[in-house]
Amino acid sequence: MKKIFSFRDFDTHYIIVFFGIQITIRHKDNFNYRPATKSGVMEDKRKKQLIVSLTTFPARINKVHLTINTLLRQKTKPDRVVLWLAESQFPDKNLPDSLTRLFDLGLEVKYCEDIRSYKKLVPSLREFPEDIIVTADDDMYYAEDWLEGLYNAYLEHPDNIYTRRGCRTVIQDNKICVIPPRKYNFKYNFPTDCNNLLMGGSGTLYPPHSLHRDIFDIDKIKSLIPTHDDIYFWVMALLNGKKIAVVGGFDYSFHYTDASRDGGLCLENTAEGLGMTSRSAFDIMTEEYPEIISILKNED
């Protein structure tokens, strides 16, 4: 028997379901933001470093400090926090004071080729091949236990890739489909397997050498799905035989900074006539790597 009424405070929305009708009401963000005041990275580096990696672009450069401040306030300190910027977008390397003041607290800024949102992971994989990379997005606040949950899960089972939030995928008519979160009422009890589609903004931990070699094929990235990095990263994990574990799932809330209003791929990928849909991105990757269908079917 279905529930007549349910209520959930999910991220920055109240989700009310009444007789099967879902109502979503946005409410004021209740994240307790505090700027970092002391070093947020390890002085004595781990042998296998824990590196938080992210990127941004000019429209958000004056607001990304909000996210980085929360990354520098983690209970479990990373060894590095690295912000990757495209050389072509910041040719004079002139950064706002809100960022440069964080250099003394552990922030590192590095420059690379403009590969859009892929910059949050691929350059770090190249520069730190033997270390643990955790990706973050540039328009989110991260709670102080965010990194702790991912890292503790990794320490317990180092072979998996870990994401704070994921969605379930299924194969229908030999095509990859995502089960919308509302179908399982924003709850999760996912097994650790390949059918968990990682949601990168929630935070994803990649152990060393966990992705297929084509993660470094920039020409392929640009030609296949230049605006769907999470799907490309997920396929690279499948091809390398890695399973994805969800840590926290929809029981762990996330909060966006106001930088999310300043554009980004979430708008480009859904706006009519721009980018591509997730559906076509899956189709493109399946055509390029048809073996992923068998991998997912075997998991089922």
Image (spheres, rainbow, N blue to C red):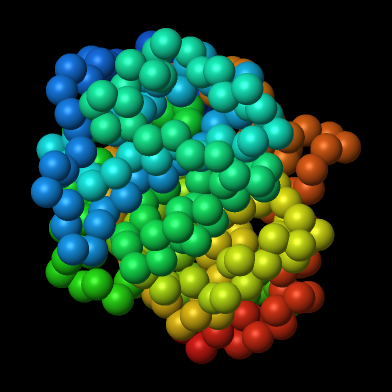
Answer whether residue 22 is visible to the viewer in this image. no
Q: Nearer the viewer, residue 147 or 173?
A: 147
- Counting every numbered tag in the picture gives 0
Residue at screen point 52% across, 53% down: 123
Q: Nearer the viewer, residue 182 or 232?
A: 232
Looking at the picture, how far across and down is residue 66, in whole percent? Answer: 38, 19
Q: Residue at x 32, y 62 (%)?
A: 131
Pick the residue in front: 133 or 279: 133
One can see residue 265 in this view: yes
In the rendered view, tell whether residue 136 sits above or below residue 126. above
Instruction: Please state the horizontal and vertical placement of residue 153, each as a whole percent of the image.
Output: 20, 61
Who's the residue at 48% across and 13% down the image?
96
Q: Going by the picture, which residue comes out furthest to the front?
A: 92
Outermost residue, right side: 273
Q: Residue at x 25, y 16 (%)?
A: 35
Q: Nearer the viewer, residue 175 or 212?
A: 212
Q: In screen coordinates, is 282 left or right of 62?
A: right
Res 255 → quadrant: top left
Instruction: Determine whether 108 is above or below 182 in the image.
Output: above
Left or right of 6? Residue 169 is: right
The percent coordinates of residue 24 (x first, y second) are 49, 25
Residue 3 in percent (x, y) is at 36, 43
In the displayed structure, 205 sits above or below 158; it is above
Q: Describe residue 84's horizontal placement relative to residue 4 as left or right.
A: right
Q: Quadrant of residue 97?
A: top left
